[in-house]
Image: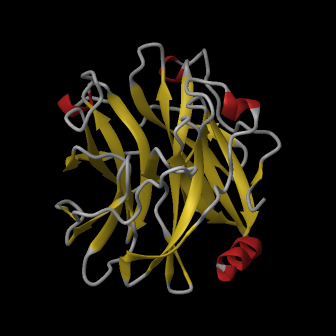
Amino acid sequence: MLFERYKNNPVISPDSGKHYKKEFAYNPCAIVHQNKVYLIYRAEGSSGISRLCLAISDDGYNFKEYNNNPIIEPNLPEEKGGCEDPRITKIDDTFYLTYTSYNGMQPVTSQTINTSLAISKDLINWKKQGIIVKGLKSAALFSKKINGKYTMFIGGKNIRIAKSKDLFNWELDKNPILDTRENKFDSRYVEAGPPPFVFNDKLVLFFNTADKNGVFHPSLALLDKNNPDKVLYRADKPLMTPTEDYELNGKANNVIFGDGLVEFKGTYFYYYGAADKYVCVATAKKKELEKYLFSL
């Protein structure tokens, strides 16, 4: 297996002593800053409303909770139901955090969820920019311009591309670049994961999938770096599949859901939500992952 689970998973768990993460702590994004790994994860207390919290690690495995969590509270009308499932990208000297804003209305539809944006210089103090894409969630922003525009991979059912000149006003492509496939492990959902990275003039896009039985597993695709609408490779098997108790049993059973991927000290750390309850990590040595990508 390409990615090896950390033997001491989970790395972040619910904490009955903290009201904001009393029940669940999951679906983290990740970024390296000042030679540390910063995780921003989704936390829920007994209210069921999600907030975003910060934890920091020197080694990628052992995390210390930020003292003044949560760092993002749901305090706008479109966030009454919570701030969920962040992804993070650094562009120049600014951090851009995309997250799902949920207005709390049932049922959950394109009328109740949006993609919102917050920006920061230090990963602690965030300034909300409001909704940037209506009716869609799960947005992963690439850090460089492509053909003069920024590119964002977005979608919780299939994955589409959105483009922007300024990072705040986005134009959504009509057709998905990755869609569900009948009778495969990705037959129910195909959802954007962490922001892609460049390898050999290709974009490596990790994404989340679910089958008809509701089992979630990560996968990957290779895209043309200069024309990311063009899919050069799409995996026929998942990268991982739920096998451990912390992945099999939780708020939602049988779930591996990855939003965070960083290269840190010669290793790729893939951070994921397990069973919508825990934050876990699996790792691959940089040389091994690049060897694998080179073979595709």
Q: Is there any visible trace of residue 33 in the rendered image?
A: no
- Across and down, in percent, residue 248 comes to 68, 30
- Is 274 left or right of 174, judged from the image as shown? right
Which quadrant would residue 121 be assigned to in this image?
A: bottom left
Position above or below: 135 against 75 = below
Placement of the N terminus among the 4 image quadrants:
bottom right
- Is 196 left or right of 32, judged from the image as shown? left
Colouring used for the render: secondary structure
- Across and down, in percent, residue 235 comes to 59, 65
- Across and down, in percent, residue 134 comes to 19, 46
- Across and down, in percent, residue 266 comes to 73, 70
1 and 43: which is toward the camera:
1
What residue sits 32% from the left and 78% below the top? Answer: 145
Which quadrant would residue 164 be assigned to in this image?
A: bottom left
What residue sits 50% from the left and 17% below the top? Answer: 19
What residue sits 55% from the left and 27% below the top? Answer: 252
235 and 32: which is toward the camera:
235
Position above or below: 89 against 215 = below
What residue sits 54% from the left and 35% below the top? Answer: 214
Farthest residue, direction right: 7
Farthest residue, direction front: 183
- Is 75 left or right of 189, judged from the image as shown? left
291 and 32: which is toward the camera:
291
